[in-house]
Amino acid sequence: MRIFKKEPDFNFMGKRFLAFALSGLIIVAGAIALTTKGFNLGIDFSGGTLIEVSFKNYTNENNLRKVLKKVGFGKSEIQRVGRKENKFFIKTIKSIEEENKSQHKSESVIENQDLGEHEKVAEMIKSSFISEKERASLKGGKIDINNASENKIKNFLITKGASEEDAMESSLKINDLKKNETGLINSFKDLEELKLRRRVMTILKDNTFLGNFTFLSTEIVGPKVGSDLRSKAILATFWALLGMLIYIAFRFKFVYAFAAVITLFHDILVILSFIVFFNVEMSLTVVAAILTLVGYSLNDTIVVFDRVRDNVKLMRREKVESIINRSINQTLTRTIVTSGTTLLTVLALFFFGGEIIHTFSLILIVGILIGTYSSIFQSCAWLKVWEKYFIRRKKI
């Protein structure tokens, strides 16, 4: 596939100092932002409770914060899922109690105790959303179908006189009905459409109610687990970079490995700067995206390096700058096509993939753009720097 009618002749090396200045400015700004406000750590790394809750009636972040403030969680992070949906993520981080640190107990005991605290947090948040009318119904022995598990509904129907067969069949149908976008059953008319046994329907109308909210998911991570995951994520990135350094040094020469690893560090630092600037939540998903981009960026860099190595043999009388420019121009079509098609795929994931992979695809989009830029303006530019200051103009 050809994009250019003839081989382009762009002077990329002539813009290397501008590229160095731009990258340096972003990285320095990112370092300053990191020291002032730090990363927005998700519960994967910090420990805490992450709840996805869905409401029947419209509400907003301010109303939720007022409710949470009454139970001591007014500083929780609240994020609406989508623009029109009435769903929210609520993230609450709670540290290990100081008394646990002072007592002579094993780490596993402390961890289990703290995990129990986070489970209590989820129950406290759930309790805060229950209205006075619903609370009275619960005290009267009724159950909230929207917040009851399939097994709980089955056992409740049995205790109220339904046969085990009818209870099992009915609870299964009710659970399937809740598997919609909101996770909620809006009215008893929806239950009537299930054509349940008359006895079962009578029990439900007399002894249950449909709550105004439901917890779609609850994720709990203890602080020690978060700390371990953070350490392992850093080690994974380090070993990935070291392995690539060894591979490139073996595959080419050390000068190429030096330039490639510097470029990879550049890509990671720029991506981390973006994460800090836009307060993207740092999670295992983000780490996975970064490691994916490390491999992607290196792949494009190796293609360019391979062409540079070939041209060194074919253009012995040319200056290093000319050899590098020629190599980048020769692989430019391949770089544009590969990055462009990959970017289109990731854009589709970003816009249509849903909330779960939204952050992952966002980091991939940024990383693809940065990786393409660095393969052209950074990796080969570092070859030129090495040639000028360390090899004293010997050919690479």
Image: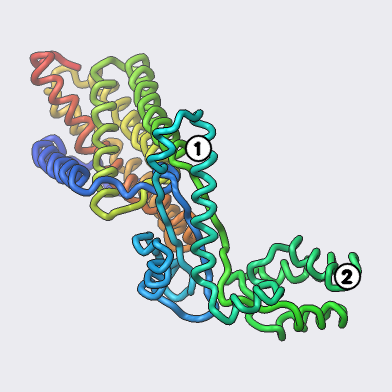
Q: Which residue is mark 1?
A: 111
Quadrant showing the N terminus: top left
**Front position in the image: 379 or 277:** 277
Give the quadrant of residue 224.
Answer: top left
On screen, residue 254 versus residue 81, left or right, reads: left
Residue 56 figure quarter: bottom right
Q: Residue at x 35, y 32 (%)?
A: 298
Q: Is residue 160 above or below residue 359?
A: below
Please tell me how many numbered marks the rendered image carries: 2
Q: Secondary structure at mark 2?
A: helix
Q: Amino acid at mark 1?
A: Glu
Measure the C-alpha gap from mark 1 to mark 2: 42 Å
Residue 96 place in picture, x, y as percent: 41, 42
Residue at 28 percent of width and 41 percent of height: 332
User: Mark 2 packing: few (<14 Cα in 10 Å), some, or many (20+)?
Assistant: some
The answer to whether 150 is drawn above or below residue 43 in the figure is: below
Image height check: is 158 above or below 233?
A: below
Q: Position of residue 45 (x, y in %)?
A: 41, 42
The C terminus sits in image quarter: top left
Which amino acid does the dot numbered 2 rest on? Asp
Which residue in the protein does label 2 denote? 166
Percent from the top left, x then y, of residue 140? 69, 77
Q: Earlier in the sequence, mark 1 or mark 2?
A: 1
Dot 1, crowdedness within 10 Å: few (<14), some or many (≥20)?
some
Tell me, yes or no, if residue 337 can be seen here.
no
Residue 285 seen in the figure = yes
